Amino acid sequence: MSSLISGTDCLKPDPIRSFVRKANDLEKETGRKIVRLNIGQPDLPPGRILEAYKRGLVSSDVVESSKYPPAEGLPELREAIARMEGRCFGVDAPDSRVYVTLGGCGALKFTFKVLGAREGKRKNLIAMAPGWGVISNFTWEYEVETRFARLETPDGKFDANLAQEMLNEDTVAIYVNSPNNPTGSILAEKTVRDILSFAEDNDIWVISDEAYQHLIHAGLEDHTSFMKYEEYTDRVFKCISFSKILKPNIRLGGLLLPRGLDDDVMASFFTALRNEGAGVSAESQSGALEVLRVDPGLSYMGEVAQGYKEKVDIAKQILLDAGCVFESYNNPLASFYLFPRTPFEDSRELTEILLNEGVSVVPGTSFHLDSHIRIAIGANMTPGEVEEGTKRVAATLEKVR
């Protein structure tokens, strides 16, 4: 029988999920409660926002319609996203450059798809580590190889020399993620501009994953969007997600396309998008639209981000006291993650030890940086639960040191 999939050596299982399964199995076997600091799930938004979302879900415009949704998204939602981007991040992108996608993953995969479709031999892109390892699986589907490297120095600067060494004639893009998963760090404005300038000098695209842009602990002004600067917007794909501002189970994201694409390219993009699945649930889109009508700038995320900050601060201090290290590259200023450098070199082994001690985290190797672990404090965890779990981490580090 012929092989169904080739190149499976490049298609790696998500190690995050494997540790979730291990935690589930251990709880069943031992009856012991495992503190889950492993999955990157957000806290719920305020009740008034959930009520707005529910109103949108049952809007007669979608409930009483038997039509397919527009492949590029409901026009009203695309307009609302464009306004929100301008209001919150200074991004000037008309709704004609906004696609609604099946989650933030859909935005990323569509971008990889169109870059992989360019004429020529196998493509590659460079990606900043630490970064979400599953990106390599996404690009593999479209015959694009992802090569991760530490392109940000410990003090937060862009290492253009290393990036230059990684480029070759088949490099089509650089993947960046700020605010970052797994660190929660934010790239400085100068670093953003340096990366954009590097991309322009080398004539490559920038794929900017900004799924966590509304989760800034101190305020949105601390985040610089890669699509903020008009002179560079002709080479930036910006990917956003409603998973982190509403709920992951609504599977809703967005893609802001580069400026200046000609009509033939836009027509091809539309065809490629239509082939992805004939649109995203109109009910989910309608729910998100109602939220943006109630709160056009998503100001409620300030409340949510403050809740994350409280929990991150608790965990960070415990980890510092346990000998963990935070520098500019892993300073948690956004999202619900911490990514401390630990005194333990082998992060997979440490993760196994921690699991046996009753706390589940994710090894740094999942993000292309060993000797670190990722800790997630979302999922509606209380500050007390975060403290309990992080203290288990600290006690284990003390034990194995």
Image (cartoon, rainbow, N blue to C red):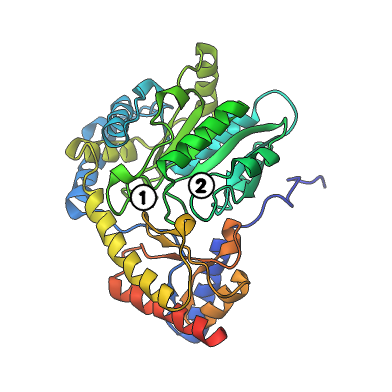
Sequence-wise, which precedes: disc 2 or disc 1?
A: 2
Residue 383 locus on image (x, y percent): 29, 71
Decide: few, some or many residues near mark 1? Use Cα within 10 Å; few <14, some 14-19, many ≥20: many
Q: Which residue does the image show at 46% across and 51% down from the upper left?
A: 180
Q: Quick one: quadrant of the C terminus?
A: bottom right
- Secondary structure state at the residue bearing disc 1: loop
Residue 119: x and y in percent read: 70, 23
Regarding residue 61, the answer to whether it shows in the image is: yes
Q: Nearer the viewer, residue 7 or 89?
A: 89
Using the image, determine if residue 281 lies above or below residue 370. Answer: above
Alpha carbon of mark 2 to alpha carbon of mark 1: how far? 27 Å
Q: Which residue is mark 1?
A: 244
Secondary element type, mark 2: loop
Q: Dot 2, how many residues are within 10 Å of its Cα: few (below 14), some (14-19), or many (20+)?
A: some
Task: Name the residue at 35% across, 63% down.
Answer: 379
Q: What amino acid is found at the position of numbered circle 1 in the picture? A: Lys
Q: Measured from the top left, where is residue 375 in percent x and y?
A: 45, 66
- State left or right for residue 101 relative to residue 15: left
| Vertical side of 69 occupied by 352: above or below | below
Q: Which residue is mark 2?
A: 157
Q: Does residue 58 sit above or below 73 in this rendering?
A: below
| The quarter of the displayed image where residue 163 is located | top right
Q: Is residue 90 above or below residue 375?
A: above
Looking at the image, can residue 258 be seen?
A: no
Picture quarter containing residue 121?
A: top right
Q: Nearer the viewer, mark 2 or mark 1?
A: 2
Q: Residue at x 21, y 48 (%)?
A: 300
Q: Amino acid at mark 2?
A: Lys
